[in-house]
Image (cartoon, rainbow, N blue to C red):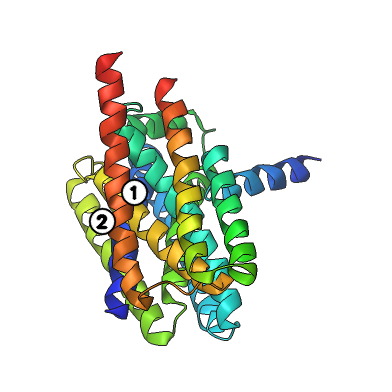
């Protein structure tokens, strides 16, 4: 069960982030060439892997209460960010993410870069930055979910790598942004999970003795999703009434 | 000066990974701080539920305001 808690959110969250990174890498690749695009993405990937290998094992040595309080708080903030946006999108207050539009904007930005003489450093930098920024969220989730021990870290890492394989494989097969991925559904689900895990762990780290122990976690999950969907319904009804 | 601006821009982008909406962020901080104080001075079981309630109150207010815009 612990390994599933580590692997599943890591896989789902990574799907969303890698799709967003792929959009920019594809835009740069189709506009500026694959050499700078892939060089930038691979360089960012190596740096991200180094972060996981460097920080991952050392997190297990941190005091349990401090670790839970800090990591739980960060997971809560991160989850709230995703859940907030997903609720507004489902409620119709904010438009759903349009991957095609992001791709077109990426192509336009890449085309506007100065012409390259030799290796296209500008194109590689755009690809590097996009992959690094999206990948940092993945690294954070992998480290947070995997910090319980080496098994959990391996499970979370494998979840992220599986998502990378799916996205990269599909993306390069179709050579187009993956606009059919249910991005908002994933953000809603993962955001709710991270909020619940974050609150549970932060609470334990701060001295809370959750009634029922680990049983409190599924209660938090059910309450979070129930309240989140209630907010979606309320926003939709308010918009219809307006 | 340019390097400092780049550093600040980078720090801002990193911070945006955690803070999307100020009210939600404040709610989480208030909830977590209140939990710590309550858990150590009053009831540790109810401190967790209070954190949950505080976080959701701030989130609901933030969502309501955002939906009105």
Q: Chain of mark 1?
A: A
Residue sticking out furthest to the top: A242
Q: Position of residue A4 (x, y in %)?
A: 27, 74
User: Element under label 1?
Assistant: helix
A119 or A21, which lies in front?
Answer: A21
Q: Tell me the residue at 49%/73% (across/down).
A: A52
A227 or A30, which lies in front?
Answer: A227
Q: Is residue A56 left or right of residue A218?
A: right
Q: Residues within 10 Å of mark 1 (few under 14, many from 20)?
A: many
Q: Position of residue B30 (x, y in %)?
A: 60, 51
Q: Which mark is residue A167?
A: 2
Tag 1 or tag 2, which sits nearer the N-term? Answer: 1
- Vertical side of A111 occupied by B32: above or below: below
Residue ID for mark 1 = A22
Q: Tell me the residue at 44%/81% (across/down).
A: A148
Does the CB distance between marks 2 and 1 fall below 8 Å? yes
Residues at marks 2 and 1, CA–CA distance in whole angstroms: 8 Å
- Vertical side of A39 occupied by A158: above or below: below
């Amino acid at each position: 069960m612990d390994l599933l808690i580590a692997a599943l959110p890591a896989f789902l969250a990574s799907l969303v982030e890698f799709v967003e990174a792929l959009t920019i890498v594809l835009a740069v690749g189709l506009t500026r060439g694959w050499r700078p695009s892939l060089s930038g993405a691979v360089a960012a990937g190596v740096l991200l892997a180094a972060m996981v290998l460097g920080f991952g094992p050392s997190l297990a040595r941190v005091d349990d209460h401090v670790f839970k309080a800090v990591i739980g708080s960060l997971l809560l903030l991160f989850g709230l960010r995703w859940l907030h946006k997903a609720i507004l999108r489902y409620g119709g207050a904010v438009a759903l993410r349009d991957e095609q539009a992001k791709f077109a904007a990426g192509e336009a930005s890449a085309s506007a870069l100065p012409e390259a003489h030799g290796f296209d450093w500008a194109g590689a930098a755009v690809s590097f930055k996009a992959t690094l920024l999206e990948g940092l969220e993945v690294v954070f989730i992998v480290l947070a979910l995997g910090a319980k021990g080496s098994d959990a870290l391996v499970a979370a890492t494998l979840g992220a790598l599986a998502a990378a394989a799916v996205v990269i494989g599909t993306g390069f097969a179709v050579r187009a942004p993956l606009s059919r991925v249910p991005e908002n559904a994933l953000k809603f689900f993962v955001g709710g999970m991270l909020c619940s895990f974050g609150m549970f762990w932060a609470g334990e780290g701060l001295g809370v003795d959750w009634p029922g122990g680990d049983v409190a976690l599924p209660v938090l999950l059910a309450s979070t999703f129930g309240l989140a969907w209630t907010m979606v319904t309320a926003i939709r009804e308010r918009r219809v009434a307006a | 000066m340019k390097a400092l601006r780049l550093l600040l821009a980078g720090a801002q982008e990193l911070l945006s990974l955690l803070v999307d909406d100020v009210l939600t962020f404040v709610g989480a901080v208030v909830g977590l701080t209140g939990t710590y104080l309550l858990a150590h001075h009053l009831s540790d079981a109810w401190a967790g539920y209070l954190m949950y309630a505080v976080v959701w109150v701030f989130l609901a207010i933030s969502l309501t305001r955002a939906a009105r815009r």
